[in-house]
Image (tube, rainbow, N blue to C red):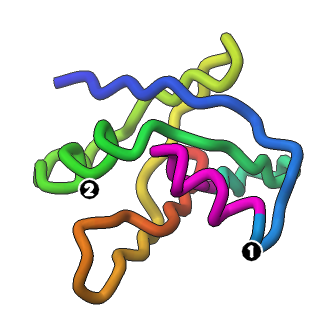
Amino acid sequence: MAIELIAAKRELEGTGASRRLRRAGQTPAVVYGAGKEAVSITLDHNTIYYALKNEAFHKETIELVIDGQKELVKVADFQLHPYKQLVLHLDFARA
C-alpha cells in the first residue's frame, strides 16, 4: 500500500503563523534527517487527521510530495489537541 501526501513549503514560522494555518484548515509539519536541512511544510488537516487513524500510516514509508519534489519519509511524531479533533503538528523523518 503506497501512501502519498501532497505538501507545500511554508516560509512563515512561529506560533502566530501556525495558528493562522490551523484556522485555514492546514496542519504545520517539519521534515528532517538524512544529513539534510529541516524543511517546514504544511499539509491539509483532514487528509492527515484521517490518515493518522490508519495503522499503516504509522508504520510504512510515506511518499511526501513537497512542491513537486518527492521524498520518502516516516512519521516520527505527531501532536493532537487534548480534547478537540485537531492535529496540531507532525514530524517526519526522512527514510
Secondary structure state at the residue bearing disc 1: helix
Q: Is residue 7 left or right of residue 76?
A: right
Residue 38 location, x and y as percent?
A: 80, 54
Name the residue tied to disc 2.
58
Q: Is residue 81 left or right of residue 8?
A: left
Q: Residue at x 60, y 19 (%)?
A: 70
* In the foreground, 63 or 24: 24
Residue 42 location, x and y as percent?
A: 61, 42
Q: Is residue 25 magenta?
A: yes
Q: Is residue 17 left or right of residue 70?
A: right
Quadrant of res 51: top left
Amino acid, disc 2 = His
Q: Note whether 68 is above or below 33 in the view shown.
A: above
Mark 2 touches mark 1? (CB < 8 Å): no
Q: Residue at x 53, y 56 (%)?
A: 22
Q: Residue at x 26, y 22 (%)?
A: 2
Q: Quadrant of the N terminus?
A: top left
Part of the protein shown in magenta: 17-29
Label of residue 15 in the image: 1
